Amino acid sequence: MYRIVTVCTGNICRSPMAEIMLNRAFEEAGLADDVLVDSAGTTGWEAGNPIDERAAAKLTELGLVSDTHRARKFDPEWYSERNLILALDVDHYEDLRLEAPDAESRSRVRMLREFDPAAAGTPVSELGIYDPWYGDQADFEATWRMVNDAVPGIVQYVLEELARATPPAEC
């Protein structure tokens, strides 16, 4: 099982949107049994709370269910349990890399928007998705758009990772 965790601040807006969107994309790619995506926050501020109603509204508009989501804090044990740790903003990326126990764990921390082909060559410092919580529905639309643009690249990356991990069939 290839495991991914998406990470934002409180785990009620950006990261659950990314989690739910990625799970659908992996399901559509026929990888639901091979890839598991979950999410967390760098803080426990919102632990136990449901997804923000504006994020839920956008996901519902897309036919995605979010009503079972409950916010939680990133667990340091996940550095060894997750193949890919996707930060939604620069501060999450920096915190996760700083707290990583070793170089291998640090290498698993990536910015979600690194996988958007339109962002190729963009410095990490410019790949963040700002927190829509402070805004209105238009900010959640912008978040959805930025996550959505990266989803195909993440799926492709995971397909390549799975192919590398699978030994060739014997004749």
Image (cartoon, helix red, strand yellow):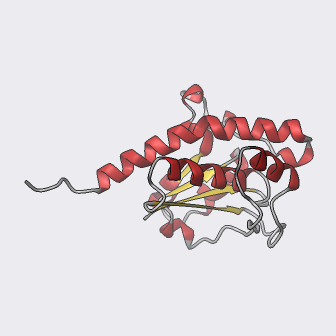
The residue positioned 71% from the left and 48% from the top of the image is: 63
The residue positioned 56% from the left and 63% from the top of the image is: 100
The residue positioned 72% from the left and 44% from the top of the image is: 62
Q: Residue furthest front?
A: 63
Quadrant of the rendered image containing residue 76: bottom right
* Total numbered labels: 0
Q: Identify the image quadrant of the N terminus.
A: bottom left
x and y percentages locating residue 49 in the rendered image: 83, 68
x and y percentages locating residue 82 in the rendered image: 51, 64
Most foreground residue, 56 or 75: 56
Decide: is 136 above or below 96: above
Q: Identify the image quadrant of the C terminus.
A: bottom left
x and y percentages locating residue 74 in the rendered image: 67, 67
Decide: is 97 above or below 71: above
x and y percentages locating residue 169 in the rendered image: 16, 55
Q: On the picture, is 6 further left or further right than 155? A: right
Q: On the picture, is 170 further left or further right than 16? A: left
Q: On the picture, is 81 further left or further right than 75? A: left
The residue positioned 80% from the left and 73% from the top of the image is: 48
Q: Residue furthest left?
A: 171
